[in-house]
Image: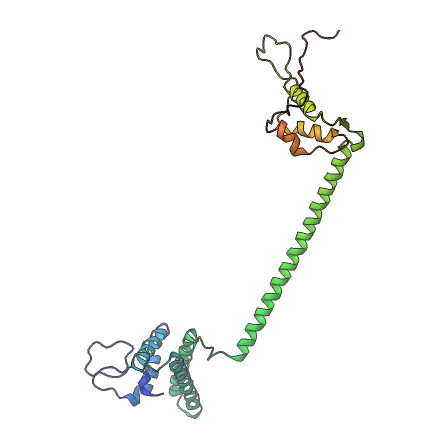
Amino acid sequence: MEGYFFKPRKNFDYRPNKYDLGTFFWSKKSHLDRLFLKKIVNLADNEYLGLYEYHKNFYLENHPEGREKIFFTKLDEFIKMAIDKEKKSILDEFSSTEKTKSEFRIKKYEAFIKIMKVKDIWNFTSDPSEGVKKMLKNIKAKQDVEQLLTNENKRLEEELAEIKNKYENLIEKYRSLAVPHTKRIVIKRGYFGTFINLLLELKEVEEPEQSEDNQFPKKIFETKAINTWVKLITNNFTEEGEEIVTSRVENYIVKGRRVPRNSYQCKIEISSKKVL
Protein backbone atom coordinates (compact mmCIF):
# COMPACT_ATOMS: atom_id res chain seq x y z
CA MET A 1 0.00 0.00 0.00
CA GLU A 2 1.52 3.34 -1.07
CA GLY A 3 2.92 5.45 1.75
CA TYR A 4 0.93 8.54 0.86
CA PHE A 5 -2.22 6.90 2.27
CA PHE A 6 -0.88 7.31 5.83
CA LYS A 7 0.14 10.36 7.83
CA PRO A 8 3.74 10.25 9.12
CA ARG A 9 4.90 11.88 12.30
CA LYS A 10 6.79 15.12 11.79
CA ASN A 11 10.46 15.07 12.70
CA PHE A 12 11.19 16.46 16.18
CA ASP A 13 7.49 16.71 16.96
CA TYR A 14 7.21 16.61 20.75
CA ARG A 15 3.42 16.32 20.77
CA PRO A 16 2.37 14.03 17.92
CA ASN A 17 -1.09 12.63 17.48
CA LYS A 18 -1.31 9.11 18.89
CA TYR A 19 -2.25 7.89 15.41
CA ASP A 20 0.80 9.42 13.66
CA LEU A 21 3.30 6.91 12.25
CA GLY A 22 7.04 7.09 12.78
CA THR A 23 9.63 8.05 15.41
CA PHE A 24 10.77 11.32 16.93
CA PHE A 25 13.56 12.09 14.47
CA TRP A 26 12.92 9.90 11.44
CA SER A 27 9.98 8.83 9.28
CA LYS A 28 10.31 7.27 5.87
CA LYS A 29 7.30 6.82 3.59
CA SER A 30 8.41 3.40 2.45
CA HIS A 31 8.13 2.15 6.04
CA LEU A 32 4.68 3.61 6.76
CA ASP A 33 2.86 0.40 5.77
CA ARG A 34 4.80 -1.61 8.32
CA LEU A 35 4.35 1.12 10.93
CA PHE A 36 0.59 1.15 10.34
CA LEU A 37 0.42 -2.58 11.02
CA LYS A 38 2.45 -2.07 14.16
CA LYS A 39 0.03 0.67 15.24
CA ILE A 40 -2.88 -1.76 14.86
CA VAL A 41 -1.13 -4.30 17.08
CA ASN A 42 -0.31 -1.73 19.78
CA LEU A 43 -3.68 0.02 19.93
CA ALA A 44 -6.80 -1.19 21.75
CA ASP A 45 -9.62 -2.43 19.57
CA ASN A 46 -11.89 0.47 20.55
CA GLU A 47 -9.39 2.89 18.96
CA TYR A 48 -9.41 1.28 15.52
CA LEU A 49 -12.21 3.43 14.16
CA GLY A 50 -10.33 6.56 15.22
CA LEU A 51 -7.16 5.26 13.52
CA TYR A 52 -9.11 4.62 10.32
CA GLU A 53 -10.75 8.06 10.33
CA TYR A 54 -7.49 9.88 11.12
CA HIS A 55 -5.53 8.48 8.17
CA LYS A 56 -8.54 8.58 5.82
CA ASN A 57 -8.96 12.31 6.50
CA PHE A 58 -5.24 12.86 5.92
CA TYR A 59 -5.46 11.06 2.58
CA LEU A 60 -8.53 13.03 1.40
CA GLU A 61 -7.10 16.39 2.50
CA ASN A 62 -3.83 15.84 0.67
CA HIS A 63 -5.30 14.18 -2.44
CA PRO A 64 -8.31 16.15 -3.79
CA GLU A 65 -8.83 13.51 -6.45
CA GLY A 66 -9.02 10.78 -3.82
CA ARG A 67 -12.16 8.99 -2.68
CA GLU A 68 -12.88 7.17 0.56
CA LYS A 69 -13.80 4.05 -1.42
CA ILE A 70 -10.24 3.93 -2.81
CA PHE A 71 -8.75 4.33 0.66
CA PHE A 72 -11.09 1.70 2.11
CA THR A 73 -10.52 -0.95 -0.57
CA LYS A 74 -6.74 -0.45 -0.59
CA LEU A 75 -6.58 -0.69 3.19
CA ASP A 76 -8.81 -3.76 3.26
CA GLU A 77 -6.63 -5.54 0.72
CA PHE A 78 -3.45 -4.47 2.55
CA ILE A 79 -4.64 -5.85 5.92
CA LYS A 80 -5.82 -9.12 4.38
CA MET A 81 -2.43 -9.56 2.70
CA ALA A 82 -0.79 -9.03 6.10
CA ILE A 83 -3.05 -11.73 7.58
CA ASP A 84 -2.13 -14.19 4.80
CA LYS A 85 1.55 -13.43 5.35
CA GLU A 86 1.25 -14.11 9.09
CA LYS A 87 -0.61 -17.38 8.45
CA LYS A 88 2.15 -18.50 6.08
CA SER A 89 4.83 -17.60 8.63
CA ILE A 90 3.07 -19.79 11.22
CA LEU A 91 3.42 -22.77 8.91
CA ASP A 92 7.09 -21.99 8.21
CA GLU A 93 8.10 -20.93 11.72
CA PHE A 94 9.53 -23.48 14.15
CA SER A 95 9.60 -21.22 17.21
CA SER A 96 6.43 -21.46 19.33
CA THR A 97 7.04 -17.94 20.60
CA GLU A 98 7.02 -16.50 17.09
CA LYS A 99 3.95 -18.53 16.22
CA THR A 100 2.17 -17.07 19.25
CA LYS A 101 3.15 -13.55 18.16
CA SER A 102 1.87 -14.20 14.64
CA GLU A 103 -1.41 -15.55 15.99
CA PHE A 104 -1.79 -12.44 18.14
CA ARG A 105 -1.13 -10.15 15.15
CA ILE A 106 -3.66 -12.06 13.06
CA LYS A 107 -6.23 -11.62 15.82
CA LYS A 108 -5.58 -7.85 15.91
CA TYR A 109 -5.71 -7.49 12.11
CA GLU A 110 -8.99 -9.39 11.91
CA ALA A 111 -10.43 -7.20 14.68
CA PHE A 112 -9.44 -4.12 12.68
CA ILE A 113 -11.17 -5.45 9.53
CA LYS A 114 -14.26 -6.21 11.58
CA ILE A 115 -14.33 -2.59 12.78
CA MET A 116 -13.76 -1.39 9.22
CA LYS A 117 -17.01 -3.06 8.11
CA VAL A 118 -18.86 -0.28 9.90
CA LYS A 119 -17.53 2.11 7.24
CA ASP A 120 -18.22 -0.25 4.33
CA ILE A 121 -21.12 1.52 2.61
CA TRP A 122 -20.20 -0.18 -0.67
CA ASN A 123 -20.57 -3.78 0.64
CA PHE A 124 -16.99 -4.40 -0.42
CA THR A 125 -16.27 -6.73 2.52
CA SER A 126 -19.62 -8.52 2.49
CA ASP A 127 -19.55 -12.28 2.14
CA PRO A 128 -21.89 -13.59 -0.62
CA SER A 129 -23.14 -16.24 1.78
CA GLU A 130 -24.08 -13.50 4.25
CA GLY A 131 -26.07 -11.78 1.52
CA VAL A 132 -27.97 -14.98 0.85
CA LYS A 133 -28.65 -15.45 4.56
CA LYS A 134 -29.87 -11.86 4.83
CA MET A 135 -32.14 -12.35 1.82
CA LEU A 136 -33.58 -15.56 3.30
CA LYS A 137 -34.09 -13.79 6.61
CA ASN A 138 -35.97 -10.96 4.88
CA ILE A 139 -38.14 -13.48 3.01
CA LYS A 140 -38.93 -15.27 6.28
CA ALA A 141 -39.79 -11.95 7.95
CA LYS A 142 -42.06 -11.05 5.01
CA GLN A 143 -43.78 -14.44 5.23
CA ASP A 144 -44.30 -13.97 8.97
CA VAL A 145 -45.88 -10.54 8.38
CA GLU A 146 -48.13 -11.95 5.64
CA GLN A 147 -49.24 -14.78 7.93
CA LEU A 148 -49.90 -12.27 10.72
CA LEU A 149 -52.00 -10.13 8.37
CA THR A 150 -53.87 -13.21 7.15
CA ASN A 151 -54.70 -14.23 10.72
CA GLU A 152 -55.76 -10.69 11.60
CA ASN A 153 -57.94 -10.46 8.48
CA LYS A 154 -59.59 -13.76 9.38
CA ARG A 155 -60.24 -12.54 12.93
CA LEU A 156 -61.77 -9.29 11.65
CA GLU A 157 -63.97 -11.16 9.19
CA GLU A 158 -65.25 -13.41 11.99
CA GLU A 159 -65.84 -10.37 14.21
CA LEU A 160 -67.68 -8.59 11.38
CA ALA A 161 -69.84 -11.66 10.77
CA GLU A 162 -70.71 -11.79 14.48
CA ILE A 163 -71.62 -8.08 14.54
CA LYS A 164 -73.69 -8.49 11.35
CA ASN A 165 -75.54 -11.44 12.90
CA LYS A 166 -76.31 -9.44 16.05
CA TYR A 167 -77.43 -6.48 13.94
CA GLU A 168 -79.74 -8.64 11.84
CA ASN A 169 -81.20 -10.17 15.01
CA LEU A 170 -81.87 -6.68 16.39
CA ILE A 171 -83.52 -5.63 13.13
CA GLU A 172 -85.67 -8.73 13.19
CA LYS A 173 -86.60 -8.09 16.81
CA TYR A 174 -87.46 -4.48 15.98
CA ARG A 175 -89.61 -5.57 13.07
CA SER A 176 -91.47 -8.01 15.30
CA LEU A 177 -92.18 -5.23 17.80
CA ALA A 178 -93.10 -2.54 15.27
CA VAL A 179 -96.71 -2.11 14.23
CA PRO A 180 -97.24 -3.40 10.65
CA HIS A 181 -97.72 -0.63 8.11
CA THR A 182 -101.20 -1.83 7.20
CA LYS A 183 -102.34 -1.69 10.84
CA ARG A 184 -101.10 1.81 11.64
CA ILE A 185 -103.45 4.73 12.29
CA VAL A 186 -103.96 6.82 9.16
CA ILE A 187 -103.82 10.60 9.42
CA LYS A 188 -105.98 12.21 6.75
CA ARG A 189 -103.92 14.29 4.34
CA GLY A 190 -103.92 17.96 5.26
CA TYR A 191 -104.35 17.27 8.99
CA PHE A 192 -100.78 16.41 9.89
CA GLY A 193 -100.23 19.84 11.48
CA THR A 194 -103.42 19.45 13.49
CA PHE A 195 -102.28 16.05 14.67
CA ILE A 196 -98.89 17.45 15.71
CA ASN A 197 -100.58 20.30 17.55
CA LEU A 198 -102.79 17.78 19.35
CA LEU A 199 -99.78 15.71 20.35
CA LEU A 200 -97.89 18.76 21.59
CA GLU A 201 -100.88 19.72 23.72
CA LEU A 202 -101.16 16.16 25.03
CA LYS A 203 -97.46 16.16 25.90
CA GLU A 204 -97.89 19.24 28.10
CA VAL A 205 -101.13 18.27 29.90
CA GLU A 206 -100.81 18.75 33.65
CA GLU A 207 -102.61 17.25 36.63
CA PRO A 208 -105.84 19.16 37.36
CA GLU A 209 -105.48 18.88 41.14
CA GLN A 210 -102.60 19.75 43.45
CA SER A 211 -101.95 18.12 46.79
CA GLU A 212 -100.68 19.99 49.80
CA ASP A 213 -97.31 18.27 49.41
CA ASN A 214 -97.09 19.23 45.76
CA GLN A 215 -97.73 22.91 45.15
CA PHE A 216 -96.52 22.74 41.55
CA PRO A 217 -98.50 20.89 38.88
CA LYS A 218 -96.96 17.83 37.25
CA LYS A 219 -97.33 16.63 33.71
CA ILE A 220 -99.43 13.54 33.23
CA PHE A 221 -97.05 12.11 30.60
CA GLU A 222 -93.37 12.21 31.37
CA THR A 223 -90.24 10.88 29.71
CA LYS A 224 -86.61 11.95 29.73
CA ALA A 225 -86.19 10.60 26.19
CA ILE A 226 -88.01 13.14 24.04
CA ASN A 227 -87.40 11.03 20.95
CA THR A 228 -89.89 8.54 22.37
CA TRP A 229 -92.65 10.90 21.21
CA VAL A 230 -91.08 10.93 17.76
CA LYS A 231 -91.01 7.12 17.62
CA LEU A 232 -94.62 7.01 18.84
CA ILE A 233 -95.66 8.85 15.68
CA THR A 234 -93.35 7.25 13.10
CA ASN A 235 -94.02 3.70 14.38
CA ASN A 236 -97.82 3.95 14.72
CA PHE A 237 -99.12 6.52 12.22
CA THR A 238 -99.04 7.12 8.48
CA GLU A 239 -100.23 10.03 6.39
CA GLU A 240 -102.68 8.59 3.90
CA GLY A 241 -100.68 5.33 3.93
CA GLU A 242 -97.26 7.00 3.45
CA GLU A 243 -94.39 6.70 5.92
CA ILE A 244 -93.87 9.71 8.18
CA VAL A 245 -90.20 10.76 8.01
CA THR A 246 -88.46 10.96 11.39
CA SER A 247 -86.73 14.29 10.64
CA ARG A 248 -90.11 15.86 9.80
CA VAL A 249 -91.49 14.95 13.24
CA GLU A 250 -88.28 16.03 15.01
CA ASN A 251 -88.69 19.54 13.60
CA TYR A 252 -91.79 19.96 15.77
CA ILE A 253 -91.16 17.71 18.77
CA VAL A 254 -87.42 18.20 19.31
CA LYS A 255 -86.51 21.48 17.60
CA GLY A 256 -89.70 23.36 18.52
CA ARG A 257 -90.80 24.39 15.03
CA ARG A 258 -94.22 26.06 14.86
CA VAL A 259 -97.16 24.09 13.58
CA PRO A 260 -98.30 25.22 10.08
CA ARG A 261 -100.86 28.06 10.18
CA ASN A 262 -103.33 26.27 7.94
CA SER A 263 -103.71 23.50 10.53
CA TYR A 264 -106.60 23.31 12.93
CA GLN A 265 -105.44 24.12 16.44
CA CYS A 266 -106.35 22.01 19.47
CA LYS A 267 -106.58 22.72 23.15
CA ILE A 268 -106.69 19.94 25.72
CA GLU A 269 -107.85 20.61 29.27
CA ILE A 270 -108.46 18.16 32.08
CA SER A 271 -111.66 18.61 34.07
CA SER A 272 -111.24 18.62 37.82
CA LYS A 273 -114.29 16.36 38.10
CA LYS A 274 -113.59 12.67 37.84
CA VAL A 275 -115.88 10.19 36.15
CA LEU A 276 -117.69 8.09 38.80
Quadrant position of the N terminus in the picture: bottom left
Question: Looking at the picture, how far across and down is residue 256, in whole percent?
Answer: 59, 26
The quarter of the picture where residue 115 lies is bottom left
- Position in image of residue 88 (x %, y %): 44, 90
Asked if residue 192 lies left or right of residue 71, the reply is right
Q: Position of residue 42 (x, y in %)?
A: 33, 79
Quadrant where the image shows the C terminus: top right
Residue 34 in sight in this render? no
Q: Look at the image and tell me whether residue 200 can be seen.
A: yes
From the viewer's perspective, is 118 left or right of 15? right
Image: 149 above or below 109: above
Give the quarter of the image for residue 7: bottom left
Tag count: 0
Q: Position of residue 67 (x, y in %)?
A: 37, 80
Q: Residue at x 73, y 39 (%)?
A: 171
Q: Quadrant of residue 11?
A: bottom left
Seen in the picture, residue 111 relative to 161 is either above or below; the reply is below
What residue is rendered at 74% in x and 41% in y?
Answer: 169
152 sits to left or right of 123: right
